[in-house]
Image (tube, coloured by chain):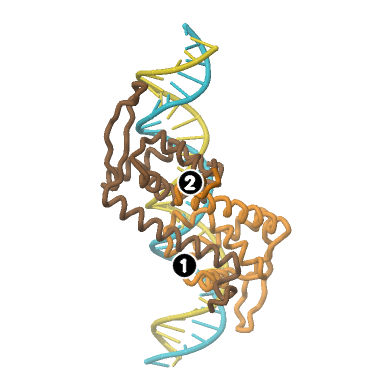
Chain colours: A brown, B orange, C cyan, D yellow
DNA sequence: CGCAATACCTTGATCTTCTAGGTATATTAT
DNA sequence: ATAATATACCTAGAAGATCAAGGTATTGCG
């Protein structure tokens, strides 16, 4: 990642799930798509993504299937399950709480906004 | 933390430095202040904060001094150094890039906003 | 043929947080 | 007075996530 490793910790799963929200994808594609959508802020490593995908599949949050690419190479596509969509919703909700919390602290606290 | 440990990873240092931006504080106070400003979203553990403070001081980002509280207890106050202010600026900048990146990915990519 | 890109994977190091302790003083309740 | 709680500092080891660096195999290109 170009972004500090620490900051990335914890959002990898949410980002992977988010990508699959817009359609089935294979791992290699997800890394490229993540870079594209984030304007190259996120350059996830394969060593980060593949273990995430395996863990999610084991947990029943994703299913997978093989598909032959026009080029002949075999690709392993991942698909969100219903359970995966729920997990994504939870992760997004937690992200928003976190983001708001950081925002509040950076601005000096919620009361600085007249909320207290 | 109430927030997932993973999400917190990497922002602890920024949050600690941010608190000291508004004045010298001692560790125990920083934990309470962080909870207050974030509406209890951040409940940093002592085992998280103290090592952060020690590392920052060793690196020259903070200085410290002892002060007697009216109650009689001794408190160890931390103060931002110039180097610490610079680190904070860098951390904030990186946070903003990260936050924007996540926002872009969640919304389907920058081009979804008409930026591409 | 050799090299880069595609496409998958794993192991071990590193970093950060948390858990769960420990020490000591001051305040409050019994 | 004594016990319990709050204040205030600290550390060691476990757990979780990412990354670096490797490996395998196929395809396309010069």
Q: Residues within 10 Å of mark 1 (few under 14, many from 20)?
A: some
Horizontal placement of D25 versus C17: left or right? left
Q: Of residues D25 and D2, which is closer to you in this image?
A: D25
- Where is residue C9? Give x, y as percent: 35, 32
**Mark 2 surroundings: few (<14), some (14-19) or many (≥20) residues within 10 A:** many
Task: State the image coordinates of residue A7 (x, y, percent, origin top left).
Answer: 52, 51
Please report the residue visible at 61 percent of the width from the left and 56 percent of the height from the top.
B92
The residue mark sitting in front, 1 or 2, is: 2
The quadrant of the rendering that contains the N terminus of chain B is: bottom left
Q: Residue at x 67, y 60 (%)?
A: B62
Name the residue: 59% across, 74% down. A112
A90 over B39 or under it: above or below? above
Q: Chain of mark 1?
A: B
**Is circle 1 on the same chain as circle 2?**
yes
Q: Which residue is mark 2?
A: B109
| Residue A42 on image: x %, y % | 51, 43
| Label located before the other in sequence (1 or 2) | 1
Q: Which mark is residue A71?
A: none
Quadrant holding the C terminus of chain B: top right
């Amino acid at each position: 990642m170009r972004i500090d490793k620490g900051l990335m910790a914890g959002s990898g799963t949410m980002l992977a799930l988010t990508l699959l929200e817009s359609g089935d994808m294979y791992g290699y594609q997800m890394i490229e798509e993540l870079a594209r959508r984030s304007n190259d802020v996120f350059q996830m490593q394969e060593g980060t993504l593949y273990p995430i995908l395996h863990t999610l599949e084991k947990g029943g949050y994703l299913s997978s299937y093989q598909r032959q690419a026009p080029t002949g190479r075999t690709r392993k596509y991942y698909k969100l399950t219903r359970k995966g969509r729920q997990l994504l919703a939870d992760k997004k909700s937690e992200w928003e709480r976190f983001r708001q919390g950081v925002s509040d602290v950076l601005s000096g606290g919620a009361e600085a906004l007249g909320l207290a």
